[in-house]
Amino acid sequence: MEGSTEKEEKLARAISAGSRREILRLLVDQELTVKEIAKETRLSVSLASRHLQLLSDLGFLLTRKEGIYRHYSLKMKEIKELLTCYDKVLRKYDA
């Protein structure tokens, strides 16, 4: 069983990269394929796929396969609240 420190590290790792935060924001209210995510984030499909794999490995995403495509969505809707709080802290930090 994971301790709280390990869970905190996983959470910090998931949101530490701007590209991963952008991907999480895209998935807040919708399900997308890696190609759609790559297009929206202007990342290569390969790099978007690596970010998605890390987020999946950390337990943040659900994956649904349909034909040759994998559709990604958030596993935890609380991620939206986390990102909102993160943005608020950044705005105050920048002020």
Image: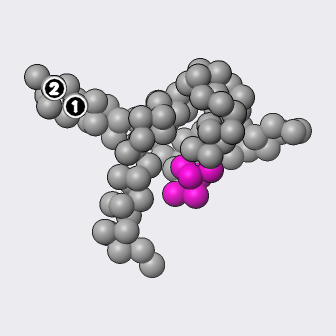
In the displayed structure image, the side of residue 16 where residue 20 appears, left or right: right
Residue farthest along the right direction in this orientation:
67
Helix, strand or loop at label 2? It is helix
Residue farthest along the left direction in this orientation:
95
Task: Name the foreground residue: 9 vs 72.
Answer: 9
For residue 23: magenta?
no
Identify the mark at residue 62; answer none if there is no mark: none
Q: Quadrant of residue 7?
A: bottom left
- The amino acid at mark 2 is Asp
Please tell me which residue is depicted at 54% across the width and 49% down the height of the picture.
55
Crowd around label 1: few <14 · some 14–19 · many ≥20 (10 Å)? few
For residue 55: magenta?
yes
Q: Position of residue 75 (x, y in %)?
A: 54, 47
Q: Quadrant of residue 1?
A: bottom left
Res 82 seen here: yes
Please tell me which residue is depicted at 81% across the width and 37% down the height of the picture.
69
Q: Position of residue 68 (x, y in %)?
A: 87, 39
Most common SS among magenta residues? helix
In this figure, which residue is indicated by the disc labeled 1? 90
- Span highlighted in magenta in the image: 53-58
**Residues at circles 1 and 2 in contact by the CB criterion of under 8 Å:** yes
- The amino acid at mark 1 is Leu
